Image (cartoon, rainbow, N blue to C red):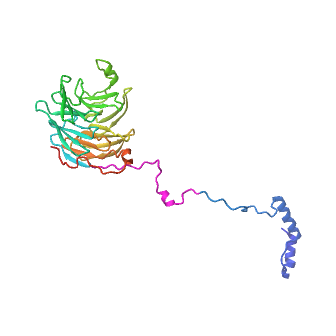
Amino acid sequence: MDFDYAHYALTEGNKGKDQVSSPSREAYRKQLAETMNLNHTRILAFRNKPLAPVELLPTDHSASLHQQPKSVKPRRYIPQTSERTLDAPDIVDDFYLNLLDWGSANVLAIALGHTVYLWDASTGSTSELVTIDEEKGPVTSINWAPDGRHVAVGLNNSEVQLWDSGSNRQLRTLKGCHQSRVGSLAGHTQEVCGLKWSGSGQQLASGGNDNVVHIWDRSVASSNSTTQWLHRLEEHTSAVKATGGGGGDRTIKFWNTHTGACLNSVDTGSQVCSLLWSKNERELLSSHGFTQNQLTLWKYPSMVKMAELTGHTSRVLYMAQSPDGYTVASAAGDETLRFWNVFGVPETAKKAAPKATHEPFSHVNHIC
């Protein structure tokens, strides 16, 4: 388009001289520069050194990548088999009885036929508390007092004996408050097969062979000569032990004991024989009968199964939890007593200085 420059290039370009812009080309360049406001300045230029990049990771990248955030709790290992199994001959295979209890002094009590045995888990010592006469027995329930020294023993003839485990001495016998065998140490219109105090000790739940759960208020009971239940829960369709339904029901139900409302009902698929709340986690352990005779660990309140513990060959009727919440003892109709490390180590035990521990009952192989 620049005719002057083209003519110059054709006529003068072969003379070996350096090519230069024509006057008209220079005028065009200046006009273009003024129009575009270029003025020979560089549009993009580094006037200063670039800023240092922000360090998103620590210097030791390899170490930080493998560290878990402090807020994430590591997954707890849950052993799927029992830590120890002991023979328990003559244990009564009866859904309505309660023949195993672990006291606050770390002593486990178990009733085998007519005899109550005690094991001190701290020292490993074994002793016999009492053997009941044939006409009174067998033993149908045992329960430790909160002090861990006194134990109540319910009998088939409706008596309740109170014993001092320290001196191995019977303190008293309660008669006349029952008309049939004492399966759970309570008075009730029908046989009671489950009892549990609330954490505050203010309310008591009782489950019976009439498929009913009663909630009793301690303050009301102490102020009235005639005790009246606070709530009557009738949704179970089978005998209720530890607020879990029997073989015809198979459910674990959760109730608001202040309002009597049923919050949740979970079909476990098999007879529910006993229940234990974890002392350290929001978890629940249930023991079952046919068909697997298992212990099932549930996450509360989602009720997601965390583990199923198998080993018993008959329904797991009785469970008891150690005072520290770490070990669970279970007894079944297969005449075995098993110990499970299912609930994990309490936080207080983790922070304590390490020391030699004594495995409960490591010196015995059977109960006799």
**Residue 69: in magenta span:** yes
The correct choice, above or below, for 185 with respect to 323 in the image is above
Please indicate whether residue 137 sits to the left or right of residue 8 in the image: left
Which corner quadrant holds the N terminus?
bottom right
Determine which quarter of the picture holds residue 217.
top left
Q: Position of residue 293 (x, y in %)?
A: 24, 43
| Residue placed furthest toward the bottom | 15
Instruction: Tell me: residue 53, above or below residue 175.
Output: below
Please give the name of the residue rendered at 76% of the width and 63% of the height, measured from the top-left corner: 42
**Is 178 displayed left or right of 59 in the figure?**
left
Verify whether residue 125 appears in magenta.
Answer: no
Q: Main secondary structure of the magenta part?
A: loop
Residue at 49% of width from left, 60% of height from top? Answer: 62
Q: Position of residue 43 (x, y in %)?
A: 75, 61
Total number of numbered discs in the rendering: 0
Q: Quadrant of residue 11?
A: bottom right
Q: Where is residue 333 in the image (x, y as percent from the top left)?
A: 19, 41
| Front-most of residues 140 and 36 | 140
Question: Image height check: is 199 above or below 366?
Answer: above
Q: What stretch is highlighted in magenta?
A: 55-81
Residue furthest left in the image:
134
Placement of 65 over or under 262, stated as above or below: below
- The quadrant of the image that shows the C terminus is top left
Can residue 238 be seen at all in this image of the molecule?
no
- Front residue (pair 1, 225): 225
Q: Can residue 119 be seen in this view?
A: yes
Residue placed most toward the observer, 267 or 128:
128
